[in-house]
Amino acid sequence: MLGHLSHTPSLSSHPRGFTLVEVMVVIVILSLFAGLMTLSVSGSDTRRNQAFYEHVKSNINYVRLLSLEAMQPYGIAVKLPQNGNNTQLVVVKLEQKPAADIAKSGQAPAWQLAPQVSPLDVPDGVEVTISPLQSGTLPTTHAPNWLVGTDAPPVVWFGTGEATPVQLNITAKHSDGNVFPVGDALVINSAGTLQPTNASDMPTVGVQP
């Protein structure tokens, strides 16, 4: 008598390939993942740039207080990259030198880095421009060149509460080549105080890649 025979399906020696639908699903998933990564990087850059903007505002207010307390000129300047370092915003103070020594030596006092405030690295893709503003109320017409001229920082607090009026614009270049403002333009008036302006009033500049 023949025993009960069980038939089991044989496994093919050739693996089954992906169907077109499966391939399309994988492509869609990879595209979504790439998009999420791009958004994550973009959001991180935005937070970094905004943190830098707030740090600049804080430094401006602090430098004004330092100048008033010490009754000594302080300033802020842009330091270009050196030895592989980033562009920096630096706080400087004017060397204390008696007027008699200046007249005798003929050497102007030097601007020195202020040890109270560390240099602030400008993030990659971000640019800081400092533009002078006209003011008829600031009594600096007869001030020496090292205080208000080309030898001085672009913005100076004179130790009396007054300052050279300037506007700081902080902009960031996006991956599409366009340049957009980071926060409001910052205006330092002749009284040495900071008054923000509306960023929407600033023109958007398209830069060709």
Image: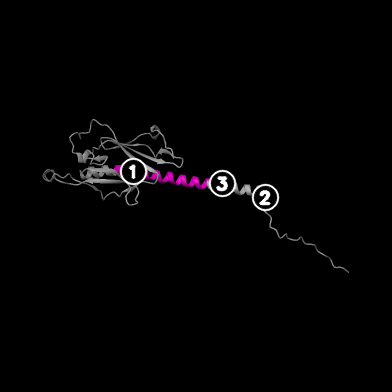
Residue 55 part of the magenta-drawn span: yes
Judged from the image, the secondary structure of the residue bearing numbered disc 2 is: loop
Which residue appears at 61% of the width and 49% of the height? 26
Judged from the image, the secondary structure of the residue bearing numbered disc 1 is: helix
Judge depth for marks 3 and 1 and give the one in front: 3
Residue type highlighted by circle 3: Ser
* Mark 2 surroundings within 10 Å by alpha-carbon count, few (fewer than 14), some (14 through 19), many (20 or more): few
* Mark 3 surroundings within 10 Å by alpha-carbon count, few (fewer than 14), some (14 through 19), many (20 or more): few
Asked if marks 2 and 3 touch (Cβ < 8 Å), the reply is: no
Q: Which mark is residue 19?
A: 2
Label 3 sits on residue? 31
Whether 109 is drawn above or below 135: the answer is below
Find residue 161 and report its image quarter: top left
Please indicate whether residue 43 sits to the left or right of residue 151 in the image.
Answer: right
Q: Which mark is residue 56?
A: 1
Residue 71 part of the magenta-drawn span: no
Region of the chain picked out in magenta, as a range: 35-61
Picture coordinates of residue 207, whole percent (x, y): 42, 37
Residue type highlighted by circle 2: Thr
Q: Which mark is residue 103?
A: none
Query: In the picture, which quadrant includes the N terminus?
Result: bottom right
Picture coordinates of residue 5, whole percent (x, y): 82, 65
Picture coordinates of residue 114, whole percent (x, y): 25, 48
Q: Who is closer to the viewer here, 176 or 193? A: 176
